[in-house]
Image: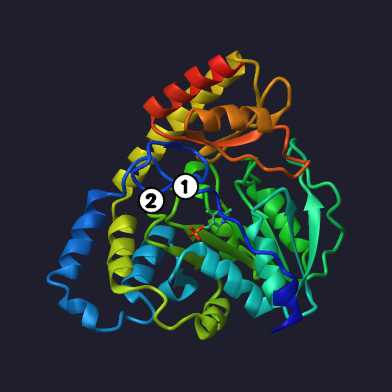
Amino acid sequence: MRDAIKQMSKYVPGFQPPDGEQWIKLNTNENPYPPSPQVAEAIRQELGDGGSLRKYPDPPSQSAREAAADLYGYDPDWIIMANGSDELLNNLIRTFVGEGEELAYLNPSYSYYATLAAIQGAKVKTFTLTEEGEIADFPERYRGKLFFLTSPNAPLGISFDNDRIAELAGRCDGVLVVDEAYADFAEINALDLVGQHDNVIVTRTFSKSYGLAGMRLGLAIARPEVVDALDKIRDHYNIDRLAQVAAVAALKDQDYLQDTVQKICATRQWFAGELETLGYALLPSQANYVFAIPPDRNGKRVYDALFERKILVRFFSDPALAHGLRISIGTREEMETSVAALKEIG
Ligand SMILES: *Cc1c(COP(=O)(O)O)cnc(C)c1O
């Protein structure tokens, strides 16, 4: 066994209570609404009596690439489909960062980057992100091979504008990967930068805005030479037949996406106002969650009290985050129940 694997610790995903248990689940930023009805219809059609599953899926997921290309205004050879955007994060590291070489990300941001770096035996550098959105110690030139910029940031919810991202890209010797898992909820995104800067790559997921976390779908927008490289190292049948038709149907139903996103953003705004009335401090969120700081700055206390009431939110024991909680935005009804619970908890 490689030393890197022996020594690394395992990534712990947000707690998933067994299906059927009555929890209000606001801990993994899933969508409270189902995917577009077109998705279930496409899956039923593809499945038929099950016979289509005898055959392997289309290796490049070409129909999905074309649907994404249409939507984002890039040619299909600038798009690669993935089995969740986590697969892309992994393959981007394998493409750009050799064993012993360095990658970077912000602290706080998505903790899975650390796990993926450990698997590769890559070195990790973190730059501190303040609650005001400043990157405290980013060097004049960053010489590492890859820099993950999560925008909107998870778990803080704040996002970076394109001038800022372009400036950071100009200071990177390696690639800048903008992890846009939540960009559909934001007012801005970095899609245009992919065409303008030769070292910018954008990743997206279907897990949050499209309500398809259970399907495992993601994609990247990148230069064709990067797409070709990622294409070499992915599992050649990475997207199964049902997921491929689901991706096409989801991407084509933009009316449904916009409708869902609008509902969630409206609920977010209402919920943020209620929390502020309760004395909480909130960071301005561009995502489907808020980072909420209780008056006594004791995230664990509130987490435990909500847990007792079968409301699951995300608490991070990291000292930089333990003063608050990340709360996903559910339905209006779920958030009303949560506000009532928080009033009781005090
Ligand atoms: C949820 C999330 C992902 C993973 O998305 P999948 O497509 O479900 O693998 C990646 N990055 C960030 C920041 C996320 O929050």
Q: Are marks 1 and 2 in contact (CB under 8 Å)?
A: yes
Where does residue 345 sit, x and y in percent of width and height? 58, 18
Q: Relative to 184, is 123 above or below?
A: below
Q: Of the residues shown, which amino acid type is indicated by label 2?
A: Tyr
Mark 1 vs mark 2: which is more N-terminal? 1
Q: Of the residues shown, which amino acid type is indicated by label 1?
A: Asp
Classed neighbour count for the residue bearing mark 1: other residues with Cα under 10 Å, few (<14), some (14–19), many (≥20)? many
Real-space Cα separation, disc 1 to disc 2, in angstroms = 9 Å
The quarter of the rendered structure image containing the N terminus is bottom right
Q: Relative to 75, is 327 above or below?
A: above
Q: Is mark 2 within 8 Å of ligand 1?
A: no
Where does residue 147 sit, x and y in percent of width and height? 72, 63
Of 307 and 113, nearer the camera is: 307
319 horizontally vs 290: left or right: right
At mark 1, the secondary structure is helix
Most extreme residue toward the left is: 49
Residue drawn at 21 percent across, 61 percent down: 42
The quarter of the rendered structure image containing the C terminus is top right
**Can residue 221 be seen by looking at this rendering?**
no
**Can residue 3 be seen by looking at this rendering?**
yes
User: Could you say which disc has been placed on residue 210 in the image?
Assistant: 2
Where does residue 34 sit, x and y in percent of width and height? 31, 45
Classed neighbour count for the residue bearing mark 2: other residues with Cα under 10 Å, few (<14), some (14–19), many (≥20)? many
Q: Circle 1 sits on which residue?
A: 184
